[in-house]
C-alpha cells in the first residue's frame, strides 16, 4: 500500500483527489504543498497529490514555484476533480435553523449566491480549511450550525448534507497532479498525453517568448497552458510554465523540448502523463513519429551523398 | 484634495504607495481591491491605488480579475514600491526582549531569514494585515512584543523601529497602479510609456497565443508582461493580461491593439501611462510615428494611382 | 479607339492577348517589352499588354525588371492566355509533305513530342518569333513547309491549320497584364482581386524575407506569387516581386503594404486589378473591411479614454 | 585527369570557370546545361561545371529546372566568376577601325554603355555565343571587325584585346557550381558552407512558404537564396529553390532540412559545399553542434525520468 503525501488535513479536496487517483494508497496529510513534495523528495512518501490549478481561481502558485525552484520531481498523472461544496450539519439540524456558518474563505466566495438565496440572515465565519470547518461543526458544543465543505469531510466527521453542490459555478474543477520521485519511469505514451515544463529565459530580450512558442509551433505541438511567474529578480523578470499536448517520448515533442532546452537558460522537464480528459492529440501532417523516423533515414542517406 | 481609494487599513504598503503617487490625496481605505475599484466606479472616490504584481509573489490575481470582469476603469500611472519590512516595537522594548511577534503571513514568509537569525526563540502569530499587527502592538496591554510592518505603520501607531529593512530579499518591489474612472483623459505620451490590456480569445484554437504575440511583434512592439488567467469555463480556457511598451497614442501601439481587437473575442484596453522606471522605448526601424504617417501618405497616393 | 502597345510583331500571343483584353484597341507592335512600356511612359500609347509569367517557363524576367527599375506604371488587368500552338501551312500542303518546319525556339521546346511523333523526319529551324515563322511560310517561295505559331498568325498570313493545339502540355498558359500610365485610376475592387508589388530590402539581413511575409500573414493576406531577382549588386543580393490576394483599397491589404513600405528600403506598388480566374478572396476572420473600420472606431474611443 | 562537362563551346565563361575550379580537368563541351548534366548522369564525365545564377541576369532557369526534374546529382563546389568582357580583334585592328561588332545578345546588353561611348557608329550583330563570335572574327575573311567575348576566347582564337573589362557593371559575376554523380561523398564541412535544395509543396496552401521559412528560422539557419519556379501545373503553382548557410552535416541544418522534408511533398537535397566567398557562418546561440548533442543527452535523460 503506497504512502502518498497530500495537502491536509483529512477531509479536503486533496484527499478526495488522492482516493480517486490511487484508491489503495495510505494518505499522509501535510501542512502545505511544499511539505507534501518534500516528503516525496526525502523518501518519506512514495508520491504526492497536489493541486496545480483551479478553473475559477487559476494557478496554485505555491505548487508552480515548488516545481520551479525545489529539487526535481516528476508529474506522472493528473485528475480533474469537480469542486462540489456541501452544506454539512449535525444530524437533526434543519436548513431554517442555520444562523452561523463556518468555512474556508475560498469556499465562502464560491458559494455566495447560495448563501444569499437560501441562508439570507446567516453569518459566515472563516476557518483555515473546509475540513477544519467540518470538524468544528461535528463538535456538539460548537457555536456553528453548519460547515461548507466537500462531501468527504461530511463522511469523516459524521455530518449530514443539508444541501448538495451549492457552489455558484457547479462546473468548477481543480486539476490535481500525482508526483513521483526523480528517476521514476515515465508513464507510457497513450496518444492522449500532456507534457509539463518550466522554462527560464537565457536573456530576457523582447521576442524571447515568441521564440519559445515557435519551437512548439514549428513541430506542430500545441500548448495547453502558459503561466508566467516572477523570477524574484524584479518586476518584469519572469519564467514560464508550459503544458503541451503529447509525450516527451513522441518525436515531435522531444525535438521541441530539446529545442527549447537549447535556447533557454534552463528548462525543467516536469513530466509526461496521460491527460485526465483523455482527448487524443490531433497530429499535424508530417509530425507523427513515423514521419520523424522516415526523415531521419532520409537525412542519413543525404549526408552520405545518396541522393 | 482628491479622494483616493486604497487597500486598507491605514498603515499598509498601499497607503504608502498612495502617498508617493498623489501626495496631497485624501486616502479612503477599503476592505479589498474590489471595494477600492467600486468606490471609483460609483464616484465615491476620484481614483484608486491598487497593487498589480509583486516581484516575489507574482500577480495580484484579484486585481487582474477585477480589471477583466468589472466595469471598465483606466490605469493612469504606476509605481514600483520597495517592499521594506520593519520590526516595530513600543518605545523602550529591546531586541533581546522580543518573544512574540505578530504580522501578516506574507510578511512572515519574506522575513523568515531575519527571524531565524535575530529572533531565534520568538513565536510568530499571524494577523489580517501588517497594519493591524502594528496597531495591535501599539496597545500597551498587547501580548505581542513586536510587529513586522511597513515604516508607515510605525509612524501611524507611534512605534519604534527595532530593526529596518529585514526582508530576506531586500530588492523586493510591489507594482501599484493608479486607477481613474472610465472617460478620464489618458496621460500624454512621454516616450517611456506602458500600455495594459486584457485579451479574450475568440476561439481557443492552438496557435491563438502565437497569433496574438505576432500582432505585437510585426509592429515592433515589445511585451513586458503576460499573465494567463482562467475564464472560469473549465481547465484549459484562459484569457490574457498583456503589458506592452509604448502608448496607445503611438501609431505602432494603436495599430497593434486594433489588430488584437480584430482577432480577439474581446479586448479590454486598461490604459497607457508613464513607466515607473522611465526607461525610454527603443523604437525599431520603420515603426516610429513619422514612419507610420509617411506610410499613410504613401498609401493614399498609391490608392489614387499616383505611383 | 485606344492605342495599345504590345510585344510584336503582329501575329504573336501578345497580340492575341491584346485582342481579348481590349477588343476595340488599335495595336502598336513593339520590338521588346521595354519598348512597349516606354511607349506608355512617353504617351505614345494609352496602355500596353505584356507577358509576366508562363506556367511552364516561369517569370518573364525582362518584364519583372522593367517594372522594378523603369519609370512607374500601373497594372490594371490580367489575362491567362492558353498557349495553343498550331501547325500552319500554305493551303494545299499535306501533313506528310512537311519536311522543314520553322518556329521560335520556345515553341520548338514545347511541341517536341508532337514533332517526334507526327513529323519524325522533319528538320526544325528557329525564327525570331512565331509570327515571323508564319510570315516566312506564307511566302510561296519559302523553303519551309510549315510554321508552328498561334492561330492568330495563321489568320493574319492566310495559312491553314494542318494540326491544332500541338503543344506537349495542352494546359500551358501565359499570364499577360494590361499596363496603364502612372496616375490612372485603379480598377474598382471586385472581391476577387490581385495586388502586385516590388520590394527592395532596407538591409539584407537574415530573416528579412520572413519579416516581409509576416506583414502579409498577420493581416490575413495570402501571397500568390513570390519571385526573387538580383539587384545587380552581387550574388546574394535580391529584391522581390510579390502578388497577393485582394485590392490595395481593402483595409487589410492597405495596412499590409503600408507595413511593408515602412520596413523596406523601397516598395513599389504595381497595381490592384481583378483576377483573371475570378476566384473570390477568402477573408480570414477579423480582417474584412468592416472589422478594420470597427477597430478604428474602437481605437479612437480608447485613445479618448472612453473604455 | 578527370573529364568534366561544361556549357560549350570552347572559349566561354563556363570553360574559364572549369579551368579555375578543376585546373587539371579535361574539358568536355556540351551544347546546353541539360547535355552537360546528362553526361555526368550517364558516366560520360566525372562531373560538370554549370552556371546557376548571374548577379545581373538572375537565375539560370534551365539549370534550376534540371536540378529539380532530372535524375539527382550532387553540387560539390561553387565559384563566383567575374564576368569580364573584352573587345577582341585580329592583330593589327585599331579601335577607330571597328565598324562591325559581333557578340551574344547578353554581352551586347551588358556592354551597351561602352559601345555607345567608344564605338558610337558601330553596328552590333548577334551570335549564338561569345565564343562563336570570337571564332568568327578570327577568320581573316570575316566581315566583322571585333568580337565581345571573355579573355579565354581571345587566347583560344589568337585575337588581341582592343579594350579590357568593357562591361557597364564591372562587378558582375556568374555563380558556377561543380556537379558530381549521385553517391559521391559530400565535401567535408569547413565552417563556411552552403547547402542547396529544391522544395515541392505538399499542398499549395496559403502560408506554406512561411512555414518552410520557419523551419529554417527556428533552427537559426539563414537562407541566402530563394527562387520560385513554376511546377508546370498552371499559373500560381510553384516550387522553390533554397540555398542556406551551413552544411547538412551540421546538426541545425540537418534538423531543418529533415523538418522541411517532413512537411514538403518532396524535398530534393542538391548538396553541401564550401562557399566561394569563404564567409564563415555566424552561429546563433544555442544552435551549434555541441548545443545539439548536449540537448540530445539531456533529452535521453529526461525520457528516462532522470530529471
Image (tube, coloured by chain):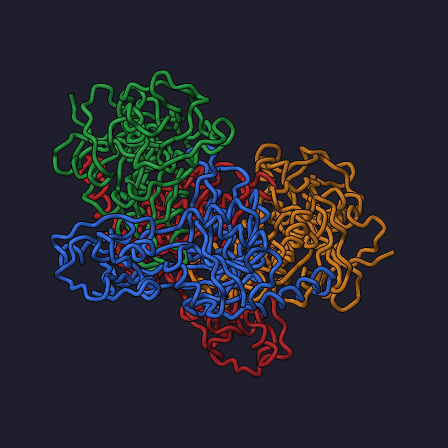
Chain colours: A blue, B green, C red, D orange
Q: Residue furthest right?
A: D1
x, y (%) of residue A148? 26, 57
Kindly indicate the quadrant of the structure image that contains residue C24: bottom left
Q: Can the viewer see residue A68 in this picture?
A: yes
Q: Can the viewer see residue C12 in this picture?
A: no
In the rendered picture of this protein, how many numbered marks are placed on residues?
A: 0
**Residue drawn at 26 percent across, 57 percent down:** A137
**Nearer the observer, C286 or C146:** C286
**Quadrant position of the N terminus of chain A in the picture:** bottom right
Kindly indicate the quadrant of the structure image that contains residue A172: bottom left
x, y (%) of residue C91? 47, 78
Vertical placement of residue A60 versus B187, above or below? below
**Nearer the observer, C153 or D297:** D297
**Nearer the observer, B187 or A65:** A65
Q: Residue furthest front?
A: A141
**Quadrant position of the C terminus of chain A in the picture:** bottom right
Q: Does residue A212 appear left or right of residue D93 in this picture?
A: left
**Residue drawn at 68 percent across, 60 percent down:** D32
Q: Does residue B98 appear left or right of residue B186 in this picture?
A: right
Q: Residue furthest top?
A: B92
x, y (%) of residue A163? 21, 65
x, y (%) of residue A108? 24, 52
Amino acid at each position: 500500500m503506497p504512502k502518498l503525501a497530500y495537502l491536509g488535513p483529512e477531509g479536503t479536496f486533496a484527499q478526495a483527489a488522492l482516493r480517486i487517483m490511487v484508491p489503495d494508497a495510505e494518505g499522509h496529510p501535510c501542512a502545505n504543498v511544499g511539505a507534501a513534495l518534500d516528503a516525496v523528495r526525502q523518501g518519506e512518501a512514495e508520491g504526492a497529490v497536489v493541486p496545480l490549478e483551479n478553473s475559477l481561481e487559476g494557478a496554485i502558485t505555491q505548487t508552480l514555484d515548488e516545481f520551479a525552484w525545489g529539487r526535481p520531481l516528476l508529474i506522472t498523472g493528473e485528475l480533474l476533480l469537480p469542486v462540489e461544496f456541501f452544506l454539512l450539519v449535525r444530524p437533526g439540524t434543519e436548513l431554517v435553523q442555520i444562523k452561523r456558518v463556518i468555512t474556508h474563505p475560498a469556499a465562502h466566495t464560491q458559494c455566495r449566491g447560495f448563501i444569499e438565496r437560501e441562508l439570507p440572515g446567516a453569518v459566515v465565519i472563516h476557518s483555515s480549511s473546509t475540513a477544519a470547518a467540518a470538524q468544528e461543526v461535528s463538535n456538539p458544543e460548537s457555536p456553528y450550525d453548519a460547515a461548507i465543505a466537500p462531501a468527504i469531510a461530511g463522511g469523516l466527521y459524521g455530518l449530514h448534507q443539508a444541501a448538495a453542490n451549492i457552489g455558484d459555478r457547479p462546473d468548477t474543477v481543480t486539476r490535481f497532479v500525482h508526483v513521483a520521485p526523480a528517476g521514476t519511469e515515465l508513464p507510457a505514451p497513450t496518444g492522449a498525453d500532456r507534457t509539463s515544463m518550466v522554462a527560464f529565459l537565457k536573456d530576457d530580450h523582447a521576442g524571447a517568448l515568441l521564440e519559445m512558442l515557435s519551437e512548439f509551433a514549428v513541430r506542430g505541438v500545441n500548448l495547453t497552458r502558459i503561466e508566467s511567474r516572477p523570477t524574484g529578480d524584479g518586476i518584469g523578470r519572469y519564467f514560464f510554465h508550459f503544458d503541451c499536448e503529447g509525450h516527451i517520448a513522441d518525436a515531435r515533442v522531444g525535438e521541441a523540448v530539446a529545442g527549447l532546452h537549447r535556447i533557454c537558460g534552463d528548462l525543467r522537464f516536469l513530466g509526461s502523463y496521460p491527460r485526465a480528459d483523455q482527448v487524443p492529440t490531433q497530429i499535424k501532417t508530417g509530425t507523427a513519429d513515423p514521419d520523424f523516423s522516415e526523415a531521419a533515414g532520409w537525412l542519413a542517406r543525404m549526408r552520405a551523398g545518396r541522393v
